[in-house]
Image (cartoon, rainbow, N blue to C red):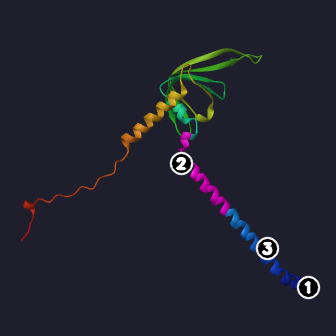
Amino acid sequence: MSNAAAHLMAAPERRQQHKHHREKTKTNEEEEEEEEQEQDKNNKGRAKKKKVKRHRSERTLFPLLESLVGMRVCVELKNDTRVVGKLEEVRFPTMNLVFEEATLEQPVYTSAGTVEIEARTPTDAVHVSGRLIRYVHIPDGVNVIKLMRRREMEKIQADLKYSRSVRKDKKRVIDPSMSTSR
């Protein structure tokens, strides 16, 4: 018997297998629907949670740094230099920082490799590139959660204040005395 003949004879068996497979998938789909209906019944009184898509800036440390604007902050850089000053600006997406009334503290190493003296240089303004930041030291006594909530409320208020309102259709009132009828 050739391969072609064996293939033709096996065709009805294959059809039977496909039919059986389709029945199985049908029952799986029905089971999934039943499970979804049960979940809907169980969650009837509960509101469905919507996934809130957040802006990229809100998924980083940017909001935390932005909420520290106006405070005296210490930033440690990758070259062991520290910048201590009043944080004036945080730029998104690079997280570059701008300080005013800042002091640069640079370590001076001895021949033994230990830090002996820190050289302090006061400056009026300092720009720190975001890629050079190693640590940001949050000032003591700062409640981060309150700070973040306050920032969120300020953002919502600003959005409401500066959002475009929907323009209502103004109905034209026609004064009969102004009409030009002949």
- Residue assigned mark 2: 48
Residue 149 seen anywhere in this rendered image of the structure = yes
The disc, 3 or 2, on the residue closer to the chain's N-terminal end is 3
Left or right, residue 43 beside residue 170: right
Residue 55: assigned label:
none
Q: CA distance from mark 2 to mark 1?
A: 62 Å
Q: CA distance from mark 3 to mark 2?
A: 41 Å
Residue 68 seen anywhere in this rendered image of the structure = no
Quadrant containing the N terminus is bottom right
Quadrant containing the C terminus is bottom left
Image x and y of residue 59, in percent: 57, 40
Image x and y of residue 18, in percent: 76, 73
Q: Which residues are magenta?
A: 30-58
Image x and y of residue 119, in percent: 62, 17
The disc, 2 or 1, on the residue closer to the chain's N-terminal end is 1
Q: Is residue 30 above or below residue 134?
A: below
Image x and y of residue 28, in percent: 70, 62
- Residue assigned mark 3: 17
Could you tell me which secondary element the residue under label 3 belongs to?
helix
Which residue type does callout 3 highlight?
Gln
**In the rendered image, which quarter is residue 138 located in?**
top right
- Residue assigned mark 1: 2
